[in-house]
Image (spheres, rainbow, N blue to C red):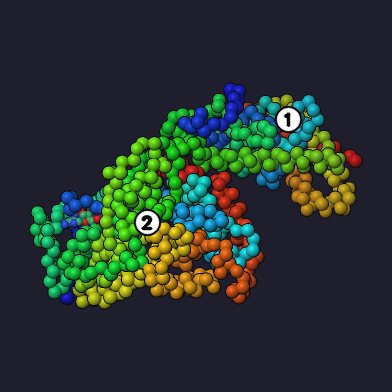
Amino acid sequence: MSKPQYVHLDPTKHNDIRLIDDSSFSHAKDFKLVNIGFNEIASLSGCMPLVLVKSGNDETLTLACCVGIEELGNVYCGEERWLGHAVPLSIQCYPFNFTIEGNRVNVLIDESSHRLTKLSGEGAKLFSSDGQPTTILKQQQENLATLLAGQEQAAAFVSILKQHDLLSPLSVTITRQSGQSFHTDGLYSINEEKYAQLEADTVLQFHKEGISMAINALLLSLRQYNRLVQLTQSFDDPAMKVGIKLDNSL
Amino acid sequence: MSQINRIIIVGGGTAGWLTAGLLAATHSEPDKDGNKLTVTVVESDTVHPIGVGEGTWPTMRRTLSKIGIPEADLIKRAGATFKQASKFVNWHKNEIGNAYYHPFSAPQGSANLDITPYWLSSQDKKGQYANDVCFQPALCEAGLAPKISAHPNQSFVANYGYHLDAGQFIDLIRTHCTQKLGVRRIVDDVISVNPNENGIGSVETRNSGNLTAELYIDCSGFSSLLIEKALSVELVDASRYLFSDRALVCQMPYEDTNAPIACYTQSTAQKAGWIWDIALQHRRGTGYVYSSKHQSDDAARDTFAKYLAQYTNAPVDKSAFREIRFSTGYRRKFWEKNCVAIGLSSGFLEPLEASSLMLIEQSATLLAEQLPANTQVMPLVEHRFNEQLQGMWESAIDFLKLHYVLSNNNAAFWKDNRLEQSIPPRLLSLLKEWQFRPILDSDFSKSSDTFSAQSYRYILYGMLNSNSNINSASTYRRTLKHAEFADKQLSLNQALIKQLKSRMPSHRGLIESFY
Ligand SMILES: Cc1cc2nc3c(=O)[nH]c(=O)nc-3n(C[C@H](O)[C@H](O)[C@H](O)COP(=O)(O)OP(=O)(O)OC[C@H]3O[C@@H](n4cnc5c(N)ncnc54)[C@H](O)[C@@H]3O)c2cc1C
């Protein structure tokens, strides 16, 4: 796939552009880890593993979901549809994205996207002729706003987890039929032992703020690694088993 | 006694074709002998329909669905747009502004409780009544559509009627009536109407001979060929309440073909009347309705031209304005013997709240529903019909007059409109009571009350001054038990506005989605 070319969305420049549906979200077929918002934890945790990932050179941790396996790619991208009941918001938002410049949020569009066309028979317009966003675009703008809010909340969530020292390295090993195995490092999840030892006040506060629920969802979601494995069954040399090691020492 | 098998409608304007459609759609089945009702429309191709009447009520949605015309056809074939409200500009000026809305949607929470008394007695800083209690004025101001998409099963978010091109609308209903509903059409001039002891004996046409039926509908417009010329049923004059008697009409193209389309009818008060401004897909329809007793025709042309000049760079050609003269009033009887008058032949009220098309829909629906089986029971239906319609017209007059009595414009036309003798008695007594209590649903409990208490609230409280009596708690002793509920509705309204703004397409966007 060509490299994304994100530019500012502009009612004049993009007036005749039309957006084509893609229910398999094929632009994401090589994705493995996808950033998610705090507000997506509940819906995604029953569908795919949720983890924290060390990103870039600095030590920032981001909340993410795992949708793919090394060399096999995104296992949820089926031929015709997405093979899960939930789709991470940032994938749904494509070909749109946002940047924050000063205190303004600007909407971007990937001009290289295969989802865009100028042919009038296909897809739906982004702007009506008066330059106003259509329902389709407004829906996408709302998704972006939710995504932004969710990512801000996710950052706060991560810093709470750090502050209470609740994170542990997670290592995941996936073995394929041929015996070849892949090992992923740099992932983190919740240290259950430490979590169990929290002060009563903190537990109460976590409970009130929905942190406990999120923590439990994160832990439970690790079972979804099995689904990832299952989803590779139609591939050549499918994944056969997954080993998860979470360091729970105090 | 004879069975009613044949109906002749004289006139093929909006009234004639809507009536034909409703009659034919309601009575499409044959009886046990295989006889079907035949509906025939006789229309002249030398006398044209009036060519105005472009704003409707939400009732038009039901009327069209009864006749079987899908909304998409109306949008694509009659240049139609969506109407969510009337906006009254300069009718009343106060601290909050010089305009207010009469939206078609009810206030927040009205299914459970009328929150108006709470709004009235609230000490908090208030905005316009309609804006505080209903989300729709905000949608209108933002140029947003009343629903998400063109999809017919899409339940609408906001209540709406239509703006439509009168000529194209007639073509649309005519084609539907003749092709789908079996309505017969005769293009010919009626040259005389022959009365007899039953009412109308026959109508004579130039080329198609003498036509007879058991029931005749007069939809011949202002010429009132049957009800007035043949049966001499006179008009009950209502010009002492509503003074306007002229209209100047002009169709304006859009300067920018992609310009936003207003989703409401705008009525702007002028020296001796008001100007309507209706946005269709490809043009605007405008008109100045005024009282010739309060402004000369020349001065009225100037007033109108000045208004139009605000919207165009091209010079305004005053000689191109079409002038329409009218008398305000309604027939003493709408149904006389075997003749029913519907449309302009039945009377006329200035188009301030698009009541004409609505009264056509109401009359034709009632006629179709109550259609007598034979001539013997006809007088019974006649009586009921007349009583009901007289109530509807009188209630429409009260409601239109309400718009005038609250203005604080001091030009002669407006001052005269506030004189007590110019106010219909029922309205006058209600106005006196409303100084001390809110408008109640029970003030309008008759089936002929075409305008609801809620419409009255939007107008009355839209023109409220902060120092008016109803605002002061001193005269108010009613129990207000549900303050919490009412407060919640007010904040819900704000939340809803925010949500809708992020979801609804623009009005033009919605219309483009039909194509
Ligand atoms: C200035 C103005 C603005 C208006 N604005 C609105 C509005 O915004 N909303 C609203 O609801 N209403 C409005 N109205 C009212 C609306 O225009 C009418 O109620 C509506 O158009 C119905 O008209 P009609 O069919 O009764 O008469 P017409 O349109 O006049 O039709 C009369 C028909 O009779 C036929 N006819 C006449 N003489 C003969 C003959 N001798 N032989 C055969 N056929 C004959 C004609 O050919 C024509 O088909 C407005 C009216 C005016 C005057």
User: x%, y% of residue B147?
Assistant: 48, 49
- Toward the right, the furthest residue is A250
Q: What element does badge 1 sit on?
A: strand
Residue extending farthest to the top is A2
* x then y, percent, for residue B450: 39, 66
> What's the distance in space between the residues labelled 2 and 1, CA to CA?
87 Å
Please state the chain letter of the residue tagged with numbered disc 1 in the rendered image: A
Towards the viewer: B27 or B489: B489
Identify the residue at horizontal 39%, vertical 49% (top origin): B277
Q: Is residue B117 left or right of residue B105?
A: right
Mark 2 or mark 1, whichever is nearer to me? 2
Q: Is residue B11 left or right of A108 when viewed as pictured?
A: left
Name the spot of residue A145 as percent of width and height, x first.
Answer: 63, 41
Residue at figure coordinates x 27%, y 64% from the top left: B346
Residue in the image at 80% along x and 39% along y: A159
Q: Is residue B7 above or below residue A72?
A: below
**Mark 1 highlights which residue?**
A175
Q: Quadrant of the C terminus of chain A?
A: top right
Q: Quadrant of residue B415?
A: bottom left
Binning the other alpha carbons within 10 Å of mark 2 as few (below 14), some (14 to 19) or many (20 upward) gives: many
Question: How many residues crowd around disc 1 within 10 Å: few (fewer than 14), some, or many (20 or more)?
Answer: some
Instruction: Name the disc covering residue B376, or none.
Output: none
Marked residue chain, label 2? B
Nearest to the observer: residue A188 or residue B497 = B497
Q: Quadrant of the N terminus of chain A?
A: top right
Pick whichever, B220 or B64, lies toward us.
Answer: B220
Q: Is residue A111 visible?
A: yes
- The three-letter amino acid code for the residue at tag 2 is Ala
Instruction: Report the residue marked by disc 2.
Output: B272
Q: How many marks do you count on the picture?
A: 2
